[in-house]
Image (tube, rainbow, N blue to C red):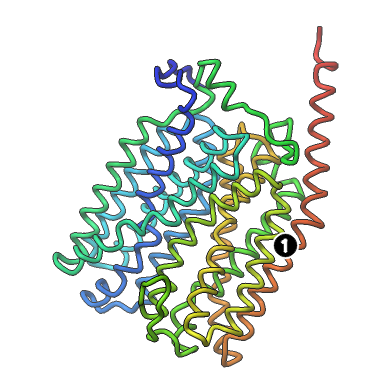
Amino acid sequence: MATVAPNPMATRGSYRWIQLFLGILCMVMIANLQYGWTLFVNPIQDKFGWTKASIQVAFTIFVLLETWLVPVEGYLVDRFGPRPVVLVGGLFCGIGWVMNSYASSLATLYVAAAISGLGAGAVYGTCVGNALKWFPDRRGLAAGLTAAGFGAGSALTVLPIQAIIKSMGYQTAFLYFGIGQGLIVMIVALMLIDPRHVINPAVARQAAKPPRPNIPQTKRDYRPMEIVRAPVFWVMYLMFVMVAAGGLMAVAQLAPIAHDFKVADIPVSIAGLTLPALTFALTIDRVMNGLCRPFFGWVSDNIGRELTMLIAFLFEGAGIFALFYLGANPVAFVLLSGLVFFAWGEIYSLFPSTTTDTFGSKFATANAGLMYTAKGTASLLVPLGNVLTRATGDWHAVFVIAAALNIIAALLAWFVLRPMRRAVIENSQREAALRPAVQPA
């Protein structure tokens, strides 16, 4: 690891919060790559006549590369620091969307999606990993705030993108936002600092604050190849897949569910705002998906990771059941869909912080990246929802399975994950206590 001169601003106690803000800003800039894609699908189809299924292959490619290569990108961050990885990631994000603006074939669209996925994964994994390293005392909150930038960031640009698509065409929107978002990420990358490079004692002490007593942390740093041999990692991975897939099966099909429940176009008035039920629900999705991440992360910093998982996953399971049985009422549909979204997105703060608590911060970016691949695995299971609906003729089986997966994950968190993690952490503490005794004099 190269020695870096201390940043003059690093003498300020608030420096790590500045680093957290910079990471959030990067996440906001890449949010459109995933959450803004839906705005371009119909215009692309109108121009070229390609089927939506073939266009959406690009999105699948994006998600898979955005998730499954994060461990490799995380290894580079742990080796060389966040700055070069985010710099290249921002460049790739910009190139991908600029290519979309010129794409006249599906092959080009797919290549652009792959490049965008590589860039987004590099930025996402780096910013979450850096937050975990800077805030060992508030990992849940820091990871949640960072992930919230990705979950809710696109809400800021939905209207501008729609306006440009309508007035100047979707290709111009791809071009302008691709260049703008990519440049901002690259500029911000130059200001990112690895906490290992901060020499100022005051800042170093703040970044090494101990966690609360009910948030046990390992005394050893595990390498990525070590954690994949640890059974506790695979228990967490299974839980991540179950909650992600369970939630996605229910919420990814929100529009057809709303139409089948015959509530999609019924006006709903809440807090003085009146919108069609489906539009209202989709709007709440963006807000709740962002708010839940720092909220549940903060809760887990105070009451513990597994207890928070137990509460959140049970909450999600109950919400999915309630949405199925009460969703034919348009007001209930809007409110319950918001509840489902609120109890679902917290996995992107709880699992990175739990992974780092269990396996250490030195290789946090790569290790959290390995856990993040569960999102890609879960996305492959989502089409099963359509298969079940066609086979059974309604949404009942989808909702039951989605709710059951969340409830099972909640029970695993408390009765399986909690004792397994305690054993791993206690073992690391025993190793740390013995280490000075075995070192040569």
Please determine whether, in this image, residue 63 is positioned above or below residue 429.
below
Apparent side of residue 235 relative to residue 22 in the rendered image (left or right) = right
**Front one among 343 and 272:** 272
Task: Spot the residue most to the bottom.
Answer: 393
Q: Secondary structure at mark 1?
A: helix
Q: Is residue 221 left or right of residue 282?
A: right
Identify which residue is drawn at 44% across, 17% down. Answer: 6
Q: Amino acid at mark 1?
A: Ala
Can you name the residue that lies furthest to the left here?
168
**25 relative to 43, above or below:** above
Density class for disc 1 (Cα within 10 Å; few <14, some 14-19, many ≥20) is many
Q: Quadrant of the C terminus?
A: top right
List x then y, in percent, for residue 16.
Answer: 49, 30
Looking at the rendering, which quadrant does residue 385 occupy? bottom right
Q: Residue furthest front?
A: 272
Which residue is label 1 attached to? 410
